[in-house]
Image: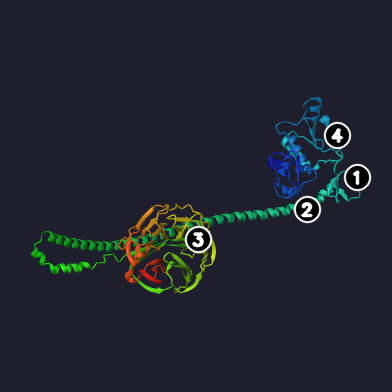
Amino acid sequence: MASSDTASSRDHYKEAIICAICQDTLSEPRTLPCMHSYCLKCLDGLVEGDDPSEEGTLKCPECRQECGIPEGGVKKFKVSPTVTFLLETLKNNHQDKEAECSICRKTYKTHTLATIRCLDCNKTFCDTCHITHDSMLEGHKVLDLTGDNAQDLETALQSIKERTVFCLVHPTKPLELYCKVDQTVLCQLCYPIDHPGHACEDIKQAAVNNMKPIGAVITQGKVLVDIYEQAIDDTQAYKADFEQNVDTIADQMINDMNTLIQSIREKYKSLTDEMAKEKESHIKQIMSHQGHLELQRCIVNSQVSKYCSIVDHAHPVEIADLVGQINQKLQDWTQIPKPQFLDRIALQYTEGISVNEGVEIGSVKTKKLCTPTFRTKRILRSSTWDLRVLPNGRYVATLGLLFYASGTWLYDSDYTPTKEIEKHREKNFKNLTLTHKGDIAFTDQSNAISICDLDGIKKREIVVDGLHTFNGITTNSRGELAVCDHNLGSVLYLDPNTGEPNSTPQCKKHTFKCPMYVAINSKDVSVVSDISGHCVKGINPDGTKRFTYGGVQGPDDGQLNGPRGVFIDACDNIMVADTGNHRVILLSPEGRFLRYLMTADDGLSFPNTVTINHNEDELLIVDSSQNLYIVKYRE
């Protein structure tokens, strides 16, 4: 047990001479005011690596206490005699061989077994040299060497506090006094020279007096250690509880997420199933209608064939006898049937939204295209070029006759004019659209685009370099301005802030003879009316042609006459103002004819512009007679 205690004590002393910076035995040790000792070279490196703004101080690597650097640098920090004695004692002790007399080895080159060690001389002596040493140097502290290196080391370590510490100024004089005024240790010669008249006391008594506050510091330190250990235990316990809590919550979140995902899957599957049922049911209606059309076609074909056969082969007697039947058939067939499928429906999908507040699942609206019904309201005294519904419930319209714009007006929700918007240049505005930022963008058949707020107050102007004549204007999903350019026969896609062409592929020049109006659907397909080409074209985002409707001037189905306004509803259906034919046509998203929404028979005359009302089921049409038609075309 004693051997174990001795080893533990020796290890404790060894720890005291290890530098915490380099983790090696202290070399030229210096002790900081906080009592931690380091190698001189390590302190030099520490000062060189410190923040320059903290010049003159350094922080202890162990306790982080800020220590002022003495004049002369870190080498002027105190040299701890205790650390010095520990280093000497541990260095001189070698457990693998017996101690030899220092005098005999150095003077006589002989190896004589040492019997004592002088702690003050830091040398070992044999019995003979011991006598000489004691006769010349009385009062030195000596230790008997037993031959057991471990025991001798322990004895030497325990005797360190009994060793004499000599004055650095007077190396032959021991430090025996403590100056209470300057709070420093000194020898008998230092006192009259540097500390005359100062209150002093014996160094040993000063040490005894200082033991009580040191004991208090140790006691309080142990209290703090206990507090920190308890706090560490509490922190570790909290950490474990917190980790467990987080893991539990994470498991709950994963389970909840899986439940919600499954719920969303079931919801969307339900929507898909409903769509499948709607598709199956509606396809049956369509096929039934198609079957009826094919039956009627076969009946008419059969009768036409029969009459052709009569013309070719029948006897005059038989032909003469068919007068009544022929007149009746001619009367029946002169009444043109309306074979269109009237139970058409439009499907509109609203995408789901995932925001911080939660998730909103997508939805599908099924709206049937109904037989158009309309009401009429007369507005201004001039024809309307373009019309849009504003987010605040009001309307804005550009007015003009033929190719000449004449003004811009704001209307309230009852279509009553409330304010005229001033033009920004010599020309009046002609076409308009709403930007993604909620402003109104106007064109005036020049190379400029004017941006106004919803009250018609000018905010800024975009001028595009070059010879341009801008007509119809709208925006795409990226917020770019898509504008018809009469001079280029094309559609330009411009940055709404700078007017510079963006990365969107540009429509080729001379794609159109005279592009007038443009609308863009949910897939960024641009639909453009060509007034001189008598057609409407769909242009893909990459600039390639998607479809063409019309192309031949005329009043028949599939023909157009100077089309102007175009608009696209929420289902991507296309409305076209077939101006010269006094009608408005409804096309599918792929540009196929669906029906006429209004014709001259309804009183429509040269319609210029079309747009969708607030409720999205009503189409607004303005013609040259200053009539505003509000057309309900979907249930």
Q: Considering only vertical position in the picture, is 106 above or below 429?
A: above
The tag earlier along the polypeptide, 3 or 4, is 4
Check disc 2: other Cα within 10 Å, few if <14, some if 14-19, many if 20+: few
Q: Which mark is residue 392?
A: none
Q: Amino acid at mark 3?
A: Ile
- Per the image, the residue denoted by label 3 is 449
State how far apart marks 4 and 1 are (Cα): 31 Å
Nearest the camera: 321 or 125?
321
Q: Is residue 6 left or right of residue 591?
A: right
Q: Is residue 4 left or right of residue 167?
A: left
- Per the image, the residue denoted by label 1 is 193
Of labels 2 and 1, the one closer to you: 1
Residues at circles 3 and 4 in contact by the CB criterion of under 8 Å: no
The tag earlier along the polypeptide, 2 or 4, is 4
Q: Quadrant of residue 264?
A: bottom left
Q: Amino acid at mark 1?
A: Ile
Nearest the camera: 559 or 381?
381
Q: Considering only vertical position in the picture, is 217 above or below 373?
A: above
The tag earlier along the polypeptide, 2 or 3, is 2
Q: Which mark is residue 213?
A: 2
Quarter of the image with the C terminus is bottom left
SS class, disc 3: strand
The tag earlier along the polypeptide, 2 or 1, is 1
Of labels 2 and 4, the one closer to you: 2
SS class, disc 2: helix
